[in-house]
Image (cartoon, coloured by chain):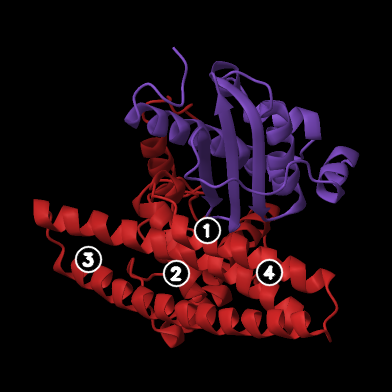
Amino acid sequence: MAYSDKVVDHFNNPRNMGSFNKDEEGVGTGMVGAPECGDVMKLQIKVQNDRIVDAKFKTFGCGSAIASSSLATEWLKGKTLEEAEQIKNTDIVQELNLPPVKIHCSVLAEDAIKAALADYQKKAGSKTGTGSAQ
Amino acid sequence: MNQPSLSSGSRNVQMARSMCWHCQSEVAGEYFCERCVKVQPVSKETDYFTCLGLPRRLTIDPALLEAKYYERSRAFHPDFYLNKTEAEQAISLDNAATLNTAYRTLRDPVQRAEYLLDLEAGSAKTIRTSPPADLFEEILDLQDTLDAYRAGDHSSETGRQLRARLEAERGALERRQAEMEDELQKLFVEWDALQDRGEADDPSRMERDRLLRRIREILSNRTYVKNIVNDLVETIG
């Protein structure tokens, strides 16, 4: 099975690799894993006024998992929280031309986005008035 | 042949199974019709334990498993069907293939446990365990160290320090692997004992769920640890 050009590109030049301090204000962290293959993914968002101003990821796994999370951070930047919720694993599959055996990598990326958003909401909710405008 | 309705699909399959495909008499024997002595297909509904004539347990005597496998292999091996009809040849081939998969799956304790989880809890993935965040952080940190070591000069002072750190981590992770194997063994024994008691009261059900969840959790964590250990071994030998 050959990786698509887009997967290879993200794998060789991963976008937004790294991490934020998870305790920093406005940072949401999603940490997910795929027990079937042992892949681990950490995806973080930095939110200001309900908009994602920055995103970072760290992934331990195959090329498709790295490409999926790299692409996810690229898409997340500049999106509102509501828009970020809308990102579906099928969008990632389409963009990266993932073969059926690698679809679970895109699912993992979607789970990571959801987990990061949930973590941010939880942090923002527990500190009333800060972290989120409105 | 009646079309099975959707609602009672699995029941119809079982009924079809109990009737000889050749002479239509009822099949009482396991894999052969007693009247016309034709080989019968192993139903797709048959789980691997049943297929090999073993109880659904997590601890299996390897010698017994092997004996059962050989016994059934002799019954199904396509070589013994060369002079039979095409239908019988096809059935023996299918049966032999199913038997091989069953044997391969049950032979390995971890695959056996994964398979049993699938049987007991539907798809094993539906048992949600909370991701082990500490372990994930550790794995991702370790990966950074690995990257730094790979990119740097191995003979430099930093390179030697990184290598020492990786070696220490590898030792710690391998000990953790061994601990997980031990705990799995204990859980397997507990599971089997629970099955042997065969009680259906609430405490038994709770105990059953607790065991399935814990086994699922360890099997998952084991995969994560195994992956990073493989990576370590590949890099530092």
Mark drawn on residue B136: 1
**Farthest residue, direction top:** A134
Q: Verify CB contact (< 8 Å) between mark 4 and mark 1.
A: no
Lower position in the chain sequence, tag 3 or tag 1: 1
At 68% from the left and 56% from the top, the residue drawn is A61
Distance of label 1 from label 2 (alpha carbons): 39 Å
Disc 4 target residue: B145
Q: Nearer the viewer, mark 2 or mark 4?
A: 4
What's the amino acid at mark 3? Gln
Q: Verify CB contact (< 8 Å) between mark 3 and mark 1.
A: no
Disc 3 target residue: B195
What's the amino acid at mark 1? Phe
Residue A22: image x %, image y %?
51, 45
Q: Tell me the SS state at disc 2.
A: loop
Q: Residues within 10 Å of mark 3 (few under 14, many from 20)?
A: some
In the rendered structure, the residue with mark 4 lies on which chain? B
Chain letter for purple, please. A
Disc 2 target residue: B52
Image-based side of A104 in relation to B122, left or right: right
Image-based side of B34 in relation to A114, left or right: left
At 41% from the left and 65% from the top, the residue drawn is B218
